[in-house]
């Protein structure tokens, strides 16, 4: 089979052009530009067989990142498996905001709660190797994957296995970040995300369960003046503001993602006086 034919056959079973090109580029270790210039090139039998299975998986709705086993987050190549959520571009907002807060001078270690693939923790550590970064996750397979991602990039992170703050009891941090599950348990969008771990997408119930637990636990784990930044659903900003207010946080503000949707809310724990 030639490259041009392979791309056409992928599209014929409903895989869009970009995804088909990305699959083939990954398989051949080439760029998309190279593919376009070589559409007469033959695939060997093994390549054609692998590509066919990848295309069938993608056509069945499996995220591209799982099919090829990796994705990119803020320029870092990360291994991903169905044990973790595929890192989303909107989560880069959490990292950008964290880096702004760290710019003057970090006042303590950074913690990423529910790190999954490690994307947020690794992106922060990569940008700020001078800052101590700790990451927790309740899932052992997720932590193992995050560790492998850290090793791949030579980044030194402290890992903690357990729910949210639980494995970090008694510690206080200078900045806390989390992209917890926040989709409501009965949200019809979950059907389209069925390949990803349900527990990473929804805490069930109204979708606020994990956000509530993280905010409620924060006062005991933050240094004075530390910020807690949370990713949340586009319709949850007001609820997250209320959670922060109820715990006595100050200066709460919400930022929009690239699609213009309110996506992250952060607040400051008892600003140092
Ligand atoms: N932003 C993801 C989505 O809607 C959900 C991620 C999450 O629950 N933390 O697909």
Image (spheres, helix red, strand yellow):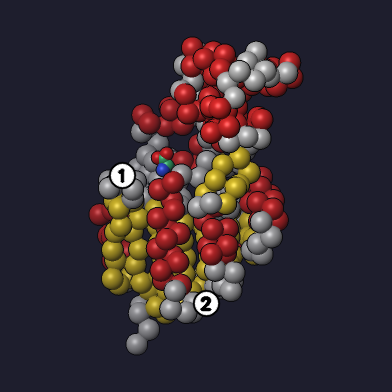
Dot 2: within a 10 Å radius of its alpha carbon, few (fewer than 14), some, or many (20 or more) residues? some
The residue at 59%/24% (across/down) is 38
The residue at 30%/57% (across/down) is 255
The residue at 41%/71% (across/down) is 101
Dot 1: within a 10 Å radius of its alpha carbon, few (fewer than 14), some, or many (20 or more) residues? few
Whole-percent x, y for residue 33 in the image: 53, 33
- Residue at disc 1, CB closer than 8 Å to ligand 1: no
Side of 41 relative to 105 (left or right): right
- Looking at the image, the residue that sits furthest to the left is 238
- Viewer can see residue 219: no
Nearer to us in this view, 30 or 112: 30
- Mark seen at residue 224: none
- Mark seen at residue 108: 2
Query: Compared with residue 163, is residue 156 higher up or lower down, i.e. above or below?
Result: below
- Viewer can see residue 37: yes
Location of the C terminus (image quadrant): bottom left
In terms of image quarters, where does ligand 1 lie? top left
Whole-percent x, y for residue 266 in the image: 35, 63
Whole-percent x, y for residue 223 in the image: 46, 77
Side of 98 relative to 254 (left or right): right
The residue at 68%/19% (across/down) is 43
Quarter where residue 229 is shown:
bottom left
Label 1: which residue? 259
Location of the N terminus (image quadrant): top right
Query: Compared with residue 69, is residue 131 higher up or lower down, i.e. above or below?
Result: below
Give how far apart the Cα atoms at labels 1 and 2 are.
32 Å
Where disc 1 sits, the SS reads: loop
Side of 48 relative to 203 (left or right): right
Whole-percent x, y for residue 86 in the image: 52, 41
Query: Compared with residue 211, is residue 188 higher up or lower down, i.e. above or below?
Result: above
């Amino acid at each position: 089979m030639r490259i041009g034919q392979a791309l056409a056959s992928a599209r014929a079973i409903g895989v869009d052009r970009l995804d088909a090109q990305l699959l083939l580029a990954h398989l051949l270790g080439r760029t998309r530009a190279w593919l376009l210039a070589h559409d007469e090139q033959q695939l060997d039998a093994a390549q054609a067989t692998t590509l066919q299975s990848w295309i069938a998986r993608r056509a069945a709705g499996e995220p591209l990142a799982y099919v090829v086993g990796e994705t990119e987050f803020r320029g870092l190549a990360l291994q991903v498996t169905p044990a973790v959520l595929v890192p989303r571009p909107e989560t880069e907002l959490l990292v950008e905001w964290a880096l702004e807060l760290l710019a003057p001078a970090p006042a303590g270690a950074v913690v990423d709660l529910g790190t999954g693939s490690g994307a947020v923790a690794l992106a922060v550590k990569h940008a700020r190797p001078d800052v101590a970064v700790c990451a927790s996750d309740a899932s052992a397979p997720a932590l193992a994957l995050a560790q492998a991602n850290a090793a791949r990039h030579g980044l030194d992170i402290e890992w903690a296995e357990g729910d949210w703050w639980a494995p970090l009891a008694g510690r206080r941090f200078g900045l806390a970040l989390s992209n917890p599950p926040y989709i409501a348990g009965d949200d019809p969008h979950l059907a389209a995300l069925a390949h990803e771990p349900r527990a990473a997408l929804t805490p069930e119930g109204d979708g606020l369960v994990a956000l509530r637990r993280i905010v409620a636990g924060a006062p005991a784990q933050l240094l004075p003046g530390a910020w807690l930044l949370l990713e949340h659903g586009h319709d949850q900003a007001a609820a997250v503001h209320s959670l922060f207010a109820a715990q006595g946080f100050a200066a709460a503000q919400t930022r929009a993602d690239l699609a213009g949707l309110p996506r992250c809310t952060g607040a400051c724990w008892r600003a140092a006086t």
